[in-house]
Image: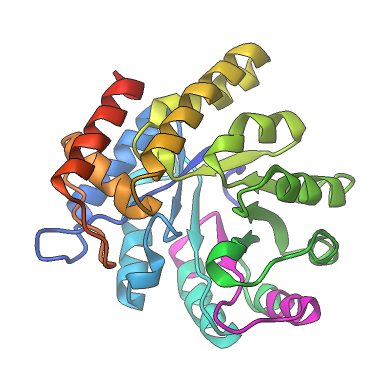
Amino acid sequence: MKQKIEGVLTAIVTTFDTQGAFNPTAQRQQVRRQLQAGNGIFCGGTNGEFFVLNEQEKLAVIETCLDETADRAPVVAHIGEISTRETIRLGKQVAQLGVDAVSVITPWFVPLKQEELIWHYRTVADALEVPLFLYNIPARTGNTLQPETVRTLAAHPNIIGIKDSAGSYDSLSGFLQATRDMDNFAVLNGPDSLIHQGFVDGCTACISGLANVAPQEINAIWRAYQLRDIEASRLAQENVTGLRTDLYSVAFSPATVKKALALMGHDVGESRYAVRFSADDEQRIRQIVNQYLQ
């Protein structure tokens, strides 16, 4: 692994043009915003709308992010597909691009037993040379990684951590407790509401979708924590939590984040999935952004 995975990685949006095609110029602009704030890049995840990208687009997004970062910050790419075979196939291509690590979401649609999830992840990890993060987001996949399962998988030399986006402190705490004595295994926090607490409890990094909208505000939580100013970190978290609660109440986060960015003057395009914003929605988003970021 080229870069240590710590601090803030932004679950960066995938930018589209007015015709809905991938827009690499705008993608570079968004990567630069994050680098200026001190954040690394997590590309092709939920906020990157991996679920509506074809394979060529996924690779193009990753290549663009890597080229723009130019080794100035860590880049982690999501490669999870519904089948083990397709995850490995995409993962081998992504590994050749030079990412620092990949993440693999649990397969979706089909309910799987814990031993089947263990088989899936071990098979993928065996097939790839690039380090691998597990990615737990049960609300979107229907499959939940249990702490004891994660501890079992953590023993694999190529599985280096887990991104937990279950959305609860109990889930995050469970993974931290289950792997606390495993020095080479990292827990990455997914929910923006738990960034500060995650660092306090032992997370090495957070993966933040909200950092697209508030890159400096998210990084401030990490920066204060690094300086051991726990109160400043907590206060920075309070502001972020308010922004998250209000903004995500409008619609599912990728589209809402993109709409907020557009209203802030960033050319990121519309989300591809079927969500539409009324004039009232847009006005509400403007008010939220102005309240928390001005």
255 in relation to 223, above or below: below
Q: Nearer the viewer, residue 30 or 212?
A: 212
Q: Quadrant of the C terminus?
A: top left
Q: Is residue 136 above or below residue 177?
A: below
On the image, the x and y values in percent for residue 284 come to 25, 36
Residue 7 visible in the snapshot = no
- Which range is magenta? 96-123
Instruction: Tell which of 172 and 12 is nearer to you.
Output: 172
Location of residue 104 (image quadrant) = bottom right
The number of callouts visible is: 0
Residue 181: percent from left, percent from top: 90, 46
The x, y position of residue 99, in whole percent, is 49, 57
Outermost residue, front side: 280
| Residue plotted at (57% across, 49% down) | 2
Question: Can residue 284 be seen at all in this image of the molecule?
Answer: yes
Task: Give percent across and percent down for residue 291.
Answer: 31, 22
Query: In the image shown, does 68 or 56 lie closer to the viewer?
Result: 56
Residue occupying the far right of the picture: 181
Q: Is residue 101 magenta?
A: yes
Colour scheme in use: rainbow
Q: Is residue 161 left or right of residue 287?
A: right
Q: Quadrant of residue 47?
A: bottom left
Does 63 appear in magenta? no
**Image point (55%, 21%), residue name:** 223
Is 256 positioned to the left or the right of 215 in the image? left
Q: Quadrant of residue 282?
A: top left
